Image (cartoon, grey):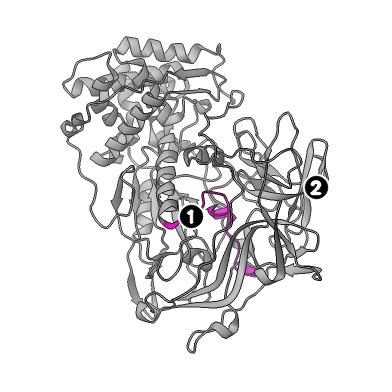
Amino acid sequence: MPGSPSRRRPPRTAGVLACAALLLPLLSAAPPAGAEAAASGALQDQFARAAARHGAPESVLLAVSYLQSRWDAHGGAPSVTGGYGPMHLTDAVTALTEAPPHHSEGTEDARGDSSRAARTGAGAARPAAVPQASALPARLRTLERAAALSGIPAGELRTRTAANIEGGAALLAAAQRESGRPASTDPADWYGAVAAYSGADDSATAATYAGDVFDVIRSGASRTTDSGQVVSLAAAPAVAPDTGQLAGLGLRRPAGGPVECPRTVACEWIPAPYEEFGDGDYGNHDKANRPASQSIDYIVVHDTEATWDVTLQLVQDPTYVSWQYSLRSSDGHVAQHLALKDVGWHAGNWFVNTKSVGLEHEGFLTAPDSWYTEAMYRSSARLVRHLAARYRIPLDRQHILGHDNVPGTVASTIAGMHTDPGPYWDWAHYFELLGRPIAPSAGPRAGVVTIRPDYGDHRPVYTGCVTAGEACAPHGSGAVRLHTAPSADAPLVKDIGLRPGGQDSTTGVNDTGARASTGQSFAVAERRGDWTAVWYLGQRAWFRNPVKEPTAVNARGLVLTPRAGLASVPVYGRAYPEASAYPAGVPVQAVSPLPYALLAGQRYVVGDRTPGEYYFAPVFDSSGHTVVRGQEEYYQIQFGHRVAFVKAADVRVSLA
């Protein structure tokens, strides 16, 4: 493979998101089914009483709970890792026993390149075996110990918020006693107990977790929880914990290796194998020389559709697929599997794979109540900020993609593309943590809108989480539905790529045909009362956007439209070079349009300008791998729920 071929990198276009001061978390929704009804200050009092009974500072108890759950009770439903209630007391055996089947729709070729046999995997349905309690690590069975310490039955710890807080306080106090330190009113004296509460078995993860808890104490927090409770933690910027207490916990050091992580996350090296099986087959990634050979332009957010242990088993299987990082939900621990210079097989689109980093988050798309912890969101955001700064990746939704935003490569692959992390991933909160909150950047007559419903209050009905056609559990969502007319009774817009026969889109949790997600920006086609129409998949698409309860913010951004004289321009799922650019021995890749058209008069928001590029890597021996780059350039656009590409020569760009 050539070392660093000379090329001209077009400048990145400006993003449409405004950079504003970091906002406090948004107010949440009404209580979910099964939540306790209580006065708005009752939860604050429950924390105060539990802290006093167990001799722990109230600020420490509040901050630990915030890092786990942001003080939400989730109606008694367990998290991804079987954690219950505001204190995230874990009972993974019960959670897995009671959990419905999980799945992310799609049968995509994770590699996404026709130069070799397809490799399916990441995001596919995988049953989670119910383990024996004795086989689980301590971090996944803290509820059992909390019951023994507090004397409160396990059932109450799962379902009663006050009991759950009491159990968490008992665990925290026990960790302080076991460290040989007395109860203290000074939060700084509780660093070791907080690190132990994480359940982490390595020192780096425990230290990162404790550091986050004390960051919450220093900065303070305030929000309304999912049960309508107002909780506040006053900022205490002078608190300086005794970090030396970590040494007394006897934790292992994380596995060494060539990890490429910021110091602000706990990261270990668990490599994906690069092995040859014979008959020309190998897995589960490709060697490369990024960014010298190919720029890294995207970060792709996935969920694992598997538990942590299963995820690690899969990525170490040489016959499976691969991604760069996995993130654990219980404590935000990170495992790196590939060097960033190499290409993972994760997104189902070879062009995107060769220019992206894949992050798999422990979780399940179709389990709305299987919530992600704040610890994982924060670790993920720090990792993304680090990668974005290293590779100059804009922090916007044209570059920070969900797997469900990656386009099919050609018409035949559209229906098989995966749909994670799905409508329950909280993009608004994620971008707050990234330091790029989604805020207005233009006035009410703006030509661009960025989707931004209130995650907690916005609860569209989804179906098919467990049984086809059956409604999913009500839950907050960052996605809006798109209709053919300004009415909730109007049919949903069609996606002829997903349904070539012209059938209507559905409310299915895996159906992305009429869905716009938080942070995605679209050009405005029309405004009418409480409804806004945007250009979407070659058609007008309406969503409810009332002034008093908006589901989008007004923005400015670059948009494109067909150049003068063209009635329509083709849309592509990858930006490949023209045929004349391919050297001898490298098969020409077809520049095949998707079954959509961008029509004259329509406008779409620009994400980036990129050269046509193809990485030829069909064999195990990487010495013959070649980057093909042509003269043809493309714009990436927000075309539907997924991004797409159009040739720069076909369009004109303006500021809206």
Start-end of magenta stretch: 391-413
Residue 22 vs 637, above or below: the answer is: above
Q: Position of residue 286 (x, y in %)?
A: 39, 70
Lateral position of residue 497 relative to residue 201, left or right: right
| Label drawn at residue 52 | none
| Residue identifier under label 1 | 393
* Viewer-nearest residue: 513 or 391: 391
From where the camera sits, is residue 640 visible? Answer: no
Amino acid under disc 1: Ile
Q: Where is residue 611 drawn, in percent x and y?
A: 56, 70
**Residue under circle 2?**
491
Question: In the rendered structure, which disc, 1 or 2, sits on the residue that comes first in sequence?
Answer: 1
Which residue: 33% across, 35% down? 209
The residue under the point 64% across, 41% down is: 441
Residue 393 on the magenta segment: yes
Amino acid type assigned to the residue bearing label 2 in the image: Pro
Q: Residue furthest bottom?
A: 584
Count of marks placed on residues: 2
The residue lying at 61 percent from left, 78 percent from top is: 590
x and y percent of residue 414 in the render? 63, 63
Residue closer to the observer: 100 or 200: 200
Drawn side of residue 426 relative to residue 524, left or right: left
